[in-house]
Each structure stands twice: as C-alpha cells, then as structure tokens.
Amino acid sequence: MYQAETGYSFEPAEKHKWYDFSGFTSRVEERMPSLDKSLDRYFDQYMESIVQEWELLTEYDLNSMEARLKRITEEIGKLESGHATLKEKAHVLDDSLHALEVRR
C-alpha cells in the first residue's frame, strides 16, 4: 500500500482488475444506442423500397448500362466510318454525274 502526499492510501494498479478499460468500452459501445446503428437498421429494413422510390441505380443496373454504353459506342464508331465511306462514294457519283452533264 502506498500513501500519496494527500494522506490517502491506495494500492498499485496491477492489483486491480478494473484498470483495463479496453473490454469495457467495446461492450458499452455495443449496448449504447447510436444514430449510426439506427440508420443501419433502417436502411437494412427499407433499402429495396428506397431504391425503387428514389429510382437509384443498383450494381446490376449500372453494369447493364455500362455494357449498353460500350455496345452503343462501338456502333457509333461503325456508323461514323460508314458515313465517311458513303460520303466518298457520293462525291465520286457527283463527279461522275457532273462529267455526264458536261458531255451532253
């Protein structure tokens, strides 16, 4: 037993089991109500209806849209290259038509 300058006596901390609060604080945190836990429970219960009501994207929707965007981008590339080819053919036909009109 030790005696402090105040005159009170106390025993060293190693003799007491209560000085380690790590287990105590985690148990208290599990039992204490918190806004985070309440929100987690709420979202777990109502997530599907929230997604539908707010028209939110799910991962499936996002993946589907990304695949669709890829296909559309590829199709646009094909159409643009086809447009250039058609424009060249139209120019050749226009030149041929102009040559025929000059011969008349």
Image (cartoon, rainbow, N blue to C red):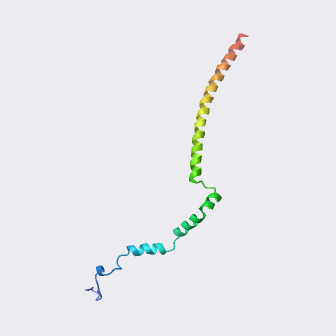
14 vs 93, left or right, is left
The quarter of the displayed image where residue 23 is located: bottom left
Which residue lies at the image location 59% right of the left edge and 47% below the top edge? 64
Q: Nearer the viewer, residue 46 or 13?
A: 46
104 vs 77, left or right, is right
29 vs 7, left or right, is right
Where is 44 relative to 20, above or below? above
Q: Nearer the viewer, residue 1 or 17?
A: 17
Which residue lies at the image location 58% right of the left edge and 37% below the top edge? 74
x and y percentages locating residue 32 in the rendered image: 49, 74
23 vs 46, left or right, is left
In the picture, the quarter occupied by the N terminus is bottom left
Which residue in the rendered view is the most extreme toward the left?
Answer: 2
The quarter of the displayed image where residue 26 is located: bottom left
Q: Nearer the viewer, residue 86 or 14?
A: 14
Which residue in the rendered view is the most extreme toward the bottom?
Answer: 7
Where is 98 relative to 16, above or below? above
Where is 72 relative to 23, above or below? above
Which residue in the rendered view is the most extreme toward the right?
Answer: 104
In the picture, the quarter occupied by the C terminus is top right
The count of marks equals: 0
Which residue lies at the image location 59% right of the left edge and 61% below the top edge? 47
x and y percentages locating residue 83 in the rendered image: 63, 29
x and y percentages locating residue 53 in the rendered image: 65, 59
x and y percentages locating residue 15 in the rendered image: 29, 81
